[in-house]
Amino acid sequence: MNVKDKVFEIIAEQAVLEPSDVTMDSTLDDLGIDSLGLVESIFAIEEAFDISIPFNANEPSESDFDISSVASIVAGIEKLIAEQHD
Amino acid sequence: MAQGMKRVVITGAGTINAIGHNVAETLEGFREGRCGIGPLDFPDVERLSIRIGGQVRGYDAEARFNRQQLALYDRFTQFTLLAVREAVAQSGLSFDGELAARSGVVLGNSGGGMTTLDANYRSVYEEGKNRVHPFVVPKLMNNAAASHVSMEFNLKGPSFTVSTACASSNHAMSQAFQMVHGGMAPVMVTGGSESMLCFGGVKAWEGLRVMSKDACRPFSANRNGMVQGEGAAVFVFEDYDHAKKRGAEILAEVVGFAMSSDAADIVMPSKNGAARAIRGAMMDARINPEEVGYINAHGTGTAANDKTECAAVADVFGAHADRLMISSTKSMHGHLIGGTGAVELLACVMALRDGVIAPTIGYEEPDPECALDVVPNEAREARVEVALSNAFAFGGLNAVLALRKV
């Protein structure tokens, strides 16, 4: 399973939706994922890809991980995998 | 009764414990003298020397809660919510407007989310993982159950958790009583819960060498220790006038309570501290010792507690100590620590309402140091007007509640 499909699966599970309901343009708000749902998603992503995501719930916009859309999340994960799995 | 003070009645009850998943099953268990204690079933139990307990069996968490709820609810919170759902349903109350704004929830609990803590310590220490689920803290905090109850039932008044080891529930219910009695809240949801039956939880208790390897036999000369249980029990305490006005069914009246501190030893109980709490509860409730027909004992089945408790009762009641009945239902459901007083209050309600006294099961040999009518092994029919419920905690913190038949 590629990164995108796995992220869709994780986010869909968190939002209690089907992966087919998630698109690259979706935002977490659109999907109804609140702040607790976000930290749970980040945990699931870290577990799934064995990466460490720099994210502080106190200042999400300051974190070096862009959560503004599903596309930015997927891109961020791909970058972290490349950096952390060398 | 002091002017302006409200009478406090119980209009709902709920429970889940080793002998029943609701009040009806639990009272049936009390009547049958059914033992809910058996072999423990959880990971690494083979590394324990104590392998029995009053576990809640046949419980399917996924049938009662959805996935998101389960991610946030430790077992002690799940048990609490199930008990509250039953109690509130029986009361017929729904909380909105002024009633919601003034009503709250006070619960007893000692170990918090012990199974959550245990599983996550195992994962980081034993399995060497470096990451834990983000909800570990909101799951394990002692007030998690009270908070989720407030959210599910829209209780917006005073809510908190009381932690006084084995007396937590009785202290919590005393607080709830006081709030309704004093007019601060028209309704309080109160009781307690505990779920420490996991490897780390039982291992810690093993260390004290007060646990029995085979059975909980309170007051019996051959008793050899306590047995842990788990679960919850919750009651709806309501202002009598409020309950009467809406035609609610009243299960019993809470007439008083007292708390005392031994100020002596961190684990050994004191006859004097226990006696002061029992006497204080009767004074607070303005009842004569002769009116007390039944006492639900703390009755842990340890050598120290049972003889100290019996001596305290003999001291307080004098000749009447030989006429009243005193039993320990821990012999059936085990010791629920922070939740135990709440489950045991059900036996007091049953005595007052149904005229059935729950037995002390596992009673095999009389002990001259516990020479009271402990209702051995079989439930008994008797008319009781007033019942007391004792709780004497580690740390010497005691709380006794007094209930009257309505």
Image (cartoon, coloured by chain):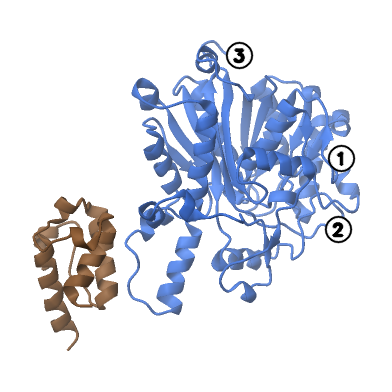
Q: Judge from the rendering whether residue B67 lies leftward or rightward of residue B247; answer left or right.
A: left
Q: Secondary structure at mark 1?
A: loop
Q: Amino acid at mark 1?
A: Leu
Of the two numbered discs 2 and 3 on the same chain, state the one appearing first in sequence. Answer: 3
Q: Percent x, y for residue B59?
A: 56, 54
Q: Secondary structure at mark 3?
A: loop
Q: Which mark is residue B1?
A: 3
Residue that carries the numbered disc 1 in the rendered image:
B372
Quadrant hosting residue B206: bottom right
Of the two numbered discs 1 and 3 on the same chain, state the one appearing first in sequence. Answer: 3
Q: Judge from the rendering whether residue B350 lies leftward or rightward of residue B231; answer left or right.
A: right
Residue that carries the numbered disc 2 in the rendered image:
B222
Q: Quick check: can you spot residue B178?
A: yes
Q: Judge from the rendering whether residue B353 lies leftward or rightward of residue B114; answer left or right.
A: right
Q: In percent of the image, x 40 and y 43: which residue is there?
A: B148
Q: In the rendered picture, chain A carries what hue? A: brown
Q: What residue occupies the far top of the structure in this picture? A: B3
Badge 3 density bin: few <14, some 14–19, many ≥20, Cα 10 Å? few
